[in-house]
Each structure stands twice: as structure tokens, then as C-alpha cells.
């Protein structure tokens, strides 16, 4: 009888031990699983082990609020899942408000004990709701099993969370390593490209330096830098050639001055002294006196600015213009020779007119002299008539002298001589010399000379040559015109505030629009017997006087040629300044 009493207890104890062992093995079974899998395994074990009607669990963050719901396959609950979930939700809400851990509720036709089991010490992991229709649920042993199961599940969930965090951290670390590796790879690639680009730039820089050196050699231009604070001077190779110094040797202000022409040395010293404090752009010309006695002409340009240290530094260039200066002097000489040729040519054309004009006063002198002799030989002598005849003879002699003076002046060969002069007077002399030719060609001459025209500073001979050339061109332009009045107008006027203008207007054949610039080119001509140098020389003369010469087409027939040159400043005009 005693054995029959102990057998169920022994069986129950053995079952409890087996259940406990099964619960204790949960952590090993769930190791490495996801949190949702751990909860599902836990609920399945408890549903079967405790004979539950249902089991529900919900996990809190950071488990993404996982919910798992299990119902016994042959249980006594017949409620729809939605209603059962609502009831469980109310139970969860009640538990959250501090209600008893266990409640008894009727679910359908059965009274169900609903037990809330926290997961974690304070329920921080989550909560389980277990429903059982047995009276006395849970027993002491079931409480023990549930406590152990909750602890094992919590351990597994914590390990799963840690493992998940580790995986996440590992993934993030791996991603960061991959990103950093990619960044380093990209940086290495950029560095490789930069090195390649830098090498290309260095190659181009070397090519540019070579090209610059060649360009400086061909243009005879050298470059330099000058640090004013310590007089540190750096020269290019070409600048050493220009000064005939040994390349690479130190350059000083004193050494540079040793090459400067003595006549330019004082100005050079003053210019260097002024540059030490002024900065900005400086430009000057000076000469070098080389050891063998030759002279070189230089033009220097430099710009002074603060450098990286905030100290004044000049960067500049020096060009040897000796060949250009010699070419300009040769060109000026050639132009002067051409001007003489043009002058002689123009005077050759005017020979007949000049001879006619000379013959008139000469014939008057002879006639008056003969008349004077007859009056003196009369009996009695006609003294008063002889006196008047002598006066007419003197008048014709003076007229002849003026004609010869104009002719010699225009034909003489002189260098540029600047003097204060009246443009009106110079123009009148030229028109007087050309008047006979103008009349012989059937032209009407009008002269409009401005009153109170200010004096100019110019070479009288050369300016009269320009006026004569413009008059000759105007006469030629109207030589074949028969369908309109042939009128020649010579006009002077003020041109702006400090210029005077002289214009020669004709009613001739004019010129084509495309020839407006060509007509001033040397050896360009529209005449069958012209040399094509008159207008070119005339423009050179006017430009030498700081003026300009141009041509315009008239609204009607013909064209107008004009030049303007600066007036003489009032102070210089009053002083009667003349330069030679």
C-alpha cells in the first residue's frame, strides 16, 4: 500500500526533474538563434510542458517589439484569435498598471488562469502571458519551472542581443573599413593622378622655360627680379648676354651702373632711388656703353608690389632695342630722302608756272627801266615820272625776290626744325606759289582762313610741303572733271581745344571706300605717272608733329584731305620758343 502512494510522487518528481533539465537546456538549444526563434521555442516548450491553453510573449526594444502567440492544438479555448489578442492586450495593460501577477478570466466557456511572467529582472526584456484551465495553476513546481525558463530565455535573449550587437558592430566596422579602404584607394588613385599631372606640369614648365629662353634670345629681351630691402637681384640668361656679364655671377646696382652710359648715369641713379619707395609701374630707356666702345639702347619695364613677406619686389623685363633704333634712324633718313625726291618732283611739275610768275615781274622791271631812261633823257627830264617808274621797278624786284625765296625754301634740304609759326601764313605762301597752276587748270580757289588762329610748333618747310602735296593732288583729281564746277577750297579752323586743322577740299573723282587706308601706304597710287609716296611722306611728317592726317569722301563729288596738329602752349608762344 505504501509503494502505491510513493509511485505517483516519484513519477511526478522524475517528470519535474526532466522538465527542469529540459528548461535548463533551453539556453544551449537557443544559442546562436535569433530572438524571435528563441521566444517561439520557449513558448512551444512551455505550452507542451505545462499543458497550457495558450502562450503569448512580447519583447520590448531593442528587440523591435517582437510578438509571438501560441495556442494549444486541442485546447479548450474556442475564441477567435482577434478577440483573444484583445483580451491579452487588456491583461498586458493591467499588468503594466501594477495589477496582480495572475488573474482568472473566462475565455469562452472556460475559466482560464492568466499568468504574467516577466522576462528580465525588472521585465526590461519583455513579458509572457500564459493561460491554463487547470485549477491551482501554477503549482509551486510550475512556478519554479517558469522562473528557470524565464531566466534561461532571458540569458538566451541577452546573448542573442549581444551577438546581434556584435554582428551589427562588426558589420559597421567592416563597412567602415571597406569605406576607408575605398577612400584610401581613391586617395591613392588621386595621388597617382596628381603625381602624373604634376609631372606633366613640370615637363610643360621645363618646355615653357626653354621656349621662354628661346623667345628672350630671339626678341633680345631679358627678365629680372629685384628685392628692394636687401638689393637681391636675379637675372635671366639673356639679360647677362645683353650686359655682357658672365652668366651666374652676382649682380649688384653698382655693377649695373658700371655699364650705363655716362650721359644717362645720373638719371639712372635718380630713377633707382625713386623706385625704392614708390612701387607700381616704372618704364624708362637708357644706353649702355660696352667695353669695346659700342653703344646699346635698352628699354626697361617693371612692376613693383609687396611680395609674400610684405616687402617691395620688382618684376620686370629689359629689351635691347639697338637694332630697332638703328632701323628707325635709317628709315627716318630714307623718308627724308624720299621727301626731297617728292619735293623735287612737285617743283618739277610747277616749273612752268614758276617761270611764268618770275617772268611777269622781270618783264616789268625791264619795261620800267627803259621807261625811266626815256624820262631822264627828255628835255627837260621828267624827274617825277622817273621816280614813279623807279618805285614800280623796286616793287617788281621785291616781288621777284619773294618768289625766289619761296622756291629756295621749298627746295632746300634741311633737318626737322621746330618753331612757332602761323598756319594761315604758311598756307597763303603755298597757295600763292600754286595760284598760276590753279588758274591754268581752270579751277576756282576759295580760301577760308580762321581768324585768331593760335600758333603751332612745327617745321615750316615740311608743313608747307604737306600743303603743297595736298593742293597738287586736288588739282590732279579735278583735271578730267567737266560735268560740275571745279572748285578748290583751303580752310583752316580750330579743332577741339588744343588742335588746329587745315583741310583741302576738291570736287574731283574722289576715291573708293575700300581705298581709304591704302591711299596713305607707300607706293600706292591711282595716277598713271605718280610715285605713290607723297601721301605716305605727308602722313609721316604730320605724325612727327604729334598730329594726324586723314581723308574723307564728300557728300557730293570729290574728297577732303585734312590734318590737325597741336597748338603751341600760350606760355611758350609768348616766349617765342623755337626748337632746332
Image (spheres, rainbow, N blue to C red):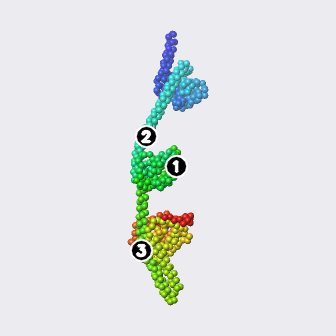
Eyeballing the image, is 331 above or below 5?
below
Q: Position of residue 105 (x, y in %)?
A: 58, 26
Q: Mark 2 highlights which residue?
A: 191
The residue at 42%/71% (across/down) is 344
Distance, label 2 to label 1, CA atoms, is 44 Å
**In the rendering, which numbered label is found on residue 349?**
3
Q: Secondary structure at mark 3?
A: helix
Q: Mark 1 highlights which residue?
A: 276
Number of other residues with Cα within 10 Å of mark 1, as a class: few under 14, some 14 to 19, many 20 or more? some
Tell me if I can see residue 577 in this picture. yes
Q: Nearer the viewer, residue 542 or 529?
A: 542
Q: Position of residue 269 (x, y in %)?
A: 50, 52
Q: Position of residue 393 (x, y in %)?
A: 49, 81
The residue at 49%/77% (across/down) is 398
Q: Secondary structure at mark 2?
A: helix
Q: Position of residue 556 (x, y in %)?
A: 48, 72
Q: Nearer the viewer, residue 3 or 345?
A: 345
Distance, label 2 to label 3, CA atoms, is 82 Å
Amino acid at each position: 500500500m505504501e509503494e502505491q502512494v510513493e509511485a505517483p510522487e516519484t513519477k511526478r518528481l522524475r517528470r519535474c526533474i526532466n522538465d527542469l533539465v529540459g528548461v535548463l537546456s533551453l539556453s544551449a538549444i537557443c544559442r546562436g538563434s535569433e530572438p524571435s526563434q528563441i521566444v517561439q521555442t520557449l513558448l512551444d516548450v512551455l505550452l507542451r510542458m505545462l499543458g497550457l491553453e495558450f502562450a503569448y510573449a512580447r519583447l520590448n526594444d531593442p528587440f523591435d517589439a517582437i510578438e509571438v502567440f501560441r495556442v494549444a492544438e486541442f485546447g479548450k479555448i474556442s475564441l477567435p484569435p482577434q478577440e483573444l489578442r484583445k483580451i491579452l492586450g487588456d491583461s498586458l495593460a493591467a499588468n503594466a498598471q501594477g495589477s496582480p501577477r495572475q488573474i482568472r478570466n473566462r475565455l469562452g466557456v472556460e475559466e482560464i488562469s492568466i499568468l504574467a511572467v516577466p522576462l528580465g529582472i525588472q521585465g526590461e526584456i519583455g513579458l509572457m502571458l500564459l493561460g491554463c484551465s487547470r485549477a491551482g495553476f501554477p503549482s509551486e513546481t510550475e512556478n519554479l519551472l517558469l522562473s528557470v525558463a524565464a531566466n534561461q530565455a532571458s540569458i538566451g535573449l541577452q546573448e542573442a542581443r549581444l551577438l546581434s550587437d556584435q554582428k551589427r558592430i562588426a558589420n559597421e566596422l567592416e563597412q567602415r573599413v571597406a569605406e576607408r579602404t575605398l577612400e584610401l584607394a581613391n586617395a591613392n588613385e588621386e595621388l597617382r593622378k596628381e603625381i602624373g599631372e604634376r609631372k606633366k606640369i613640370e615637363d610643360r614648365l621645363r618646355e615653357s622655360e626653354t621656349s621662354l629662353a628661346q623667345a628672350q634670345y630671339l626678341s633680345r629681351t631679358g627678365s629680372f627680379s629685384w628685392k628692394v630691402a636687401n638689393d637681391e637681384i636675379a637675372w635671366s640668361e639673356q639679360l647677362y648676354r645683353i650686359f655682357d656679364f658672365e652668366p651666374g655671377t652676382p649682380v649688384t646696382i653698382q655693377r649695373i651702373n658700371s655699364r650705363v652710359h655716362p650721359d644717362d648715369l645720373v638719371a639712372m641713379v635718380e630713377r633707382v632711388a625713386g623706385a625704392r619707395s614708390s612701387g607700381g609701374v616704372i618704364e624708362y630707356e637708357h644706353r649702355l656703353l660696352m667695353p669695346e666702345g659700342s653703344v646699346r639702347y635698352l628699354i626697361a619695364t617693371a612692376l613693383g608690389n609687396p611680395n609674400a613677406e610684405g616687402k617691395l619686389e620688382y618684376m620686370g623685363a629689359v629689351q635691347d632695342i639697338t637694332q630697332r633704333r638703328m632701323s628707325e634712324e635709317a628709315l627716318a633718313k630714307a623718308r627724308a630722302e624720299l621727301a626731297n625726291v617728292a619735293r623735287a618732283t612737285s617743283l618739277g611739275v610747277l616749273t612752268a608756272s614758276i617761270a611764268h610768275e618770275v617772268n611777269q615781274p622781270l618783264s616789268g622791271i625791264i619795261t620800267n627801266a627803259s621807261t625811266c631812261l626815256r624820262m631822264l633823257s627828255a628835255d627837260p627830264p621828267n624827274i617825277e615820272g622817273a621816280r614813279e617808274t623807279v618805285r614800280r621797278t623796286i616793287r617788281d624786284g621785291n616781288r621777284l625776290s619773294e618768289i625766289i625765296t619761296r622756291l629756295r625754301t621749298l627746295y632746300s634740304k634741311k633737318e626737322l626744325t621746330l618753331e612757332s609759326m602761323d598756319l594761315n601764313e604758311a598756307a597763303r605762301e603755298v597757295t600763292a606759289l600754286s595760284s598760276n597752276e590753279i588758274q591754268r587748270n581752270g579751277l576756282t580757289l576759295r580760301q577760308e582762313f580762321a581768324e585768331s588762329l593760335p600758333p603751332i610748333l612745327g617745321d615750316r618747310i615740311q608743313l608747307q610741303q604737306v600743303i603743297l602735296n595736298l593742293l597738287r593732288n586736288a588739282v590732279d583729281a579735278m583735271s578730267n572733271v567737266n560735268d560740275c564746277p571745279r572748285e578748290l577750297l583751303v580752310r583752316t579752323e580750330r579743332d577741339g581745344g588744343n588742335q588746329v586743322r587745315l583741310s583741302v577740299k576738291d570736287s574731283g573723282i574722289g576715291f573708293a571706300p575700300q581705298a581709304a587706308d591704302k591711299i596713305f601706304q607707300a607706293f600706292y597710287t591711282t595716277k598713271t605717272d605718280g610715285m605713290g609716296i607723297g601721301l605716305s611722306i605727308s602722313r609721316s611728317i604730320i605724325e612727327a608733329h604729334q598730329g594726324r592726317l586723314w581723308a574723307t569722301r564728300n557728300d557730293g563729288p570729290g574728297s577732303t584731305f585734312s590734318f590737325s596738329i597741336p597748338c603751341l602752349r600760350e606760355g611758350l608762344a609768348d616766349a617765342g620758343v623755337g626748337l632746332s
